[in-house]
Image (cartoon, rainbow, N blue to C red):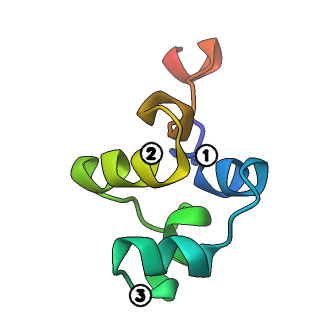
Amino acid sequence: MNKDMNRLKVVLAETKRTNRWLAEQLGKDQATVSKWCTNTSQPSLETLFQIAECLGVKVQDLISKATSKDHE
């Protein structure tokens, strides 16, 4: 099973934003955002919507797509 549940690190790179910038936008600790980026922990659904708004992307863009092997 794919352990990477979110694509936050990838999307931050694509939008040329940093963990620090996102943490400031959300009023969160930079360590928290770092944990989300490494998939150590996951943001809440509400926070995912806030992240998507900050980055100008869809929530779906932040979530890893499951592969067929994940469902076997």
Q: Residues within 10 Å of mark 3 (few under 14, many from 20)?
A: few
Q: Disc 2 residue type?
A: Ala
**x, y percent for residue 21:** 58, 76
- The image quadrant that residue 34 belongs to is bottom right
**x, y percent for residue 10:** 72, 50
From the image, tell me which residue sits under label 3. Answer: 29
The label shown at residue 33 is none
Structural distance between the alpha carbons of marks 3 and 1? 19 Å
Q: Disc 1 residue type?
A: Arg
The answer to whether residue 29 is left or right of residue 39 is left
Q: Are marks 2 and 3 in contact (CB under 8 Å)?
A: no
Nearer the N terminus, badge 2 or badge 3?
3
Q: Disc 3 residue type?
A: Asp
Please tell me whether mark 2 or mark 1 is closer to you in this view: 2
The label shown at residue 52 is 2
Q: Residues within 10 Å of mark 1 (few under 14, many from 20)?
A: some
Image: 69 above or below 43? above
Structural distance between the alpha carbons of marks 2 and 1? 11 Å
Q: Residues within 10 Å of mark 2 (few under 14, many from 20)?
A: some
The label shown at residue 7 is 1
SS for tag 3?
loop
Please tell me whether mark 2 or mark 3 is closer to you in this view: 2
**x, y percent for residue 44:** 27, 55
